[in-house]
Amino acid sequence: MGDRWHVEVDRSVCIGSGMCVGTAPDGFVLDSARQSHPKEPETDAAEAVLEAAESCPVEAITITLADSGEVVFPPED
């Protein structure tokens, strides 16, 4: 069994570009205010979800390991 991720979108940062939805339509949805939300806050680790976080122009998406809280994205400097 693979890792489980906890996915969060900081809606105070999100600009509604829709890049995450375009990259991972199974992972993200835009609400009526064009703010991104993860479809499921906890999900199986998936390359598309990571690519969506990496493609976010304002880095509003945070991914952590569900069991340990270890940061998957964004990488720590």
Image: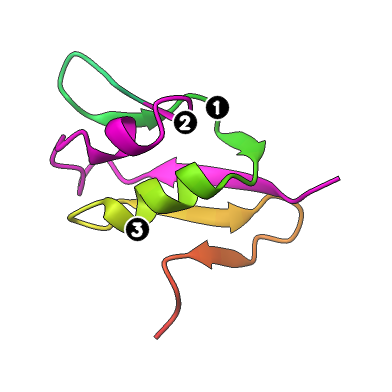
Q: Which mark is residue 40?
A: 1
Mark 3 packing: few (<14 Cα in 10 Å), some, or many (20+)? many
Q: Are marks 2 and 3 in contact (CB under 8 Å)?
A: no
Mark 2 vs 3, N-terminal side: 2
In this rendering, position of residue 8 left or right of residue 2: left
Please name the amino acid that badge 2 sits on. Answer: Gly
Q: Which mark is residue 54?
A: 3
Residue 35 lies within the magenta run: no
Mark 1 vs 2, N-terminal side: 2
Q: Residue at x 28, y 53 (%)?
A: 55
Say which of marks 1 and 2 sits in front.
2
Residue lying furthest right:
1
Name the one closer to the observer, 73 or 8.
Answer: 73
Mark 3 vs 1, N-terminal side: 1
Q: Are marks 1 and 2 in contact (CB under 8 Å)?
A: yes
> What range of the chain is rendered magenta?
1-28
Name the one closer to the observer, 46 or 9.
Answer: 46
Say which of marks 3 and 1 sits in front.
3
Q: In the picture, which quadrant includes the C terminus?
A: bottom left
Please name the amino acid that badge 3 sits on. Answer: Glu
Mark 2 packing: few (<14 Cα in 10 Å), some, or many (20+)? many
Q: Which mark is residue 50?
A: none
Please name the amino acid that badge 1 sits on. Answer: Glu
Vertical relation: 34 (above or below) 60: above
Instruction: Return the residue at label 2.
Output: 27
Vertical relation: 70 (above or below) 15: below
